[in-house]
Image (spheres, rainbow, N blue to C red):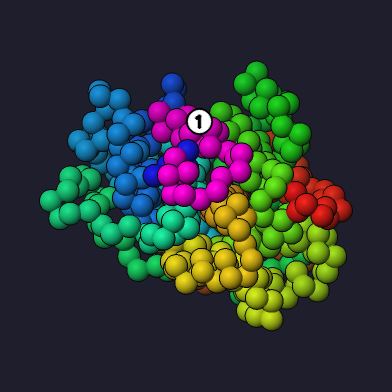
Amino acid sequence: MSQGDSTAHGAAQRPGPDGHTAAARRVLLIPDEPGALPVELRIMAAARAAERTGQHRLAARYRAMAPEAVPVTASVSEAAPALTAAVLAFTDRVTADPAGTGPTALRDLAVHGLDAPAVVALAQIAAFVAYEARVESGLALLAGGPAAEPGPEPDAVREPAAGSAHETAPPPAAPHAPEAGRFTLRPLTWRPRVPAVDADALTGAQRAVIDAHPTLSAASPYYRTLLHDPAALDHRTYVYDAVMYGRGGLPRAERELATLLVSRANGCVYCASVHGRKYAQLVRDEAAALRVLDRGGEALAGDVRGAALARFAEAQTRTPPAATGQDVAALRAAGLDDTELTGLVHAVALFGWANRLMLVLGDAHDEARNDTRDEAHGDAHRGDAPMPHPARTLDAGIPRTDARESCSRTSVPAPRTDGA
């Protein structure tokens, strides 16, 4: 069931990002100009990610999007087997362990012929599916179903090459995350691993997206990296703003708490810093945010509502998602109504998308400590020698701005009584 069909689950649905979710799906999977990443591989990657996240019907809907002339079950690997294998391996890694997806994974895609726009598009696809699959999962839970669907029948059509997208998903696993002491409320900077778009050479389409959203800035290397696919960034921003800033539903402070918990569980030091500060501002309690950064959901053990929210958020962050009907019952018992529950589902899912983009496409840097958080992104945390930052060679012609930024808005208004 797609997000646009969410009312069929019986969950109350406040006005949300459904239309832009569908539009993001279209521009990512069947764009008019797919560039170096063919439509077949885009759909294959999306279906693969959905299967790995326990959403087999969603995977089937992705495959059904393929134009008749593009048979996703007949492999492009006959022409480019190494590229197909690299795309599926990258998709698996980003889906299951975004913090462990190091710069080498991006270089491998480049070796097999993907340019910067194609690499960004593939990262967006895997990240988008992490969002949509968790929306599906969460809404199914609210309706009394399981968080992950059982696998298909053994005689189901299988993906060719590099394993099967129909393989039974592995048991739910938490992504790799850095030790708690690496999280901070200090403002961080973010440096891209792939060449960002030159701020002085934006196309009309890229400039239009920046101008359409007050939360975006061409000074930001993060948004200039995502501008390799301006249509996807456009729809992603509408979804983000609707989920995080829409009126009604889950109180703003609890949206920030949910995204802080998800970011911590995913190992996204940058997003945890941003949303930890926002949570601290909204509840007027920096110490509370620091406790969550340090201990995760355990820090909320004395708060019935907060503890229930944390259990759900952390379980849904696993791959496949692992929340249960008992977790939903605990949320209802703690006072969340259907509209708030739906908002929580979307906030948790959204940061499956946001964290993956931040973790995979760049690195967080703590100026106060003068360190780059590569240990949260693979390679270095396994004890390998530090690797030269890819952007320094791939993006040598673009001035290094490393602008400090948030995942979206940087300012937080005073708490409102309606929670909006």
Which residue sits at x=76%, y=45%?
Answer: 409
| Figure quadrant of residue 187 | bottom right
Kindly tell me whether residue 145 is visible in this rendering. Answer: yes
Residue, far bottom: 302
Q: Position of residue 87 (x, y in %)?
A: 37, 45
Kindly tell me whether residue 232 is visible in this rendering. Answer: no
- Disc 1 residue type? Ala
**Label 1 Cα crowd, 10 Å radius (few <14 / some 14-19 / many 20+):** some
Query: Is residue 133 inside the magenta stretch?
Result: no
Which residue sits at x=51%, y=69%?
Answer: 329
User: Relative to residue 218, is residue 60 depicted above or below?
Assistant: below
Q: In the image, is 338 to the left or to the right of 398?
A: left
Which residue sits at x=55%, y=33%?
Answer: 20
Query: Is residue 9 inside the magenta stretch?
Result: yes
Q: Position of residue 146 (x, y in %)?
A: 38, 61
Residue, far top: 204
Residue, far left: 155
User: In the image shown, does 384 or 100 lie closer to the viewer?
Assistant: 100
What range is drawn magenta here?
5-30
Q: Position of residue 382 (x, y in %)?
A: 50, 71
Q: Which residue is mark 1?
A: 23
What element does badge 1 sit on?
helix
In terms of secondary structure, what is the magenta stretch mainly?
helix
User: In the image shown, does 42 or 304 lie closer to the viewer?
Assistant: 304
- The quadrant of the picture occupied by the N terminus is top left
User: In the image shown, does 141 or 412 lie closer to the viewer?
Assistant: 141
Q: Position of residue 231 (x, y in %)?
A: 56, 28
Q: In the image, is 371 to the left or to the right of 139?
A: right
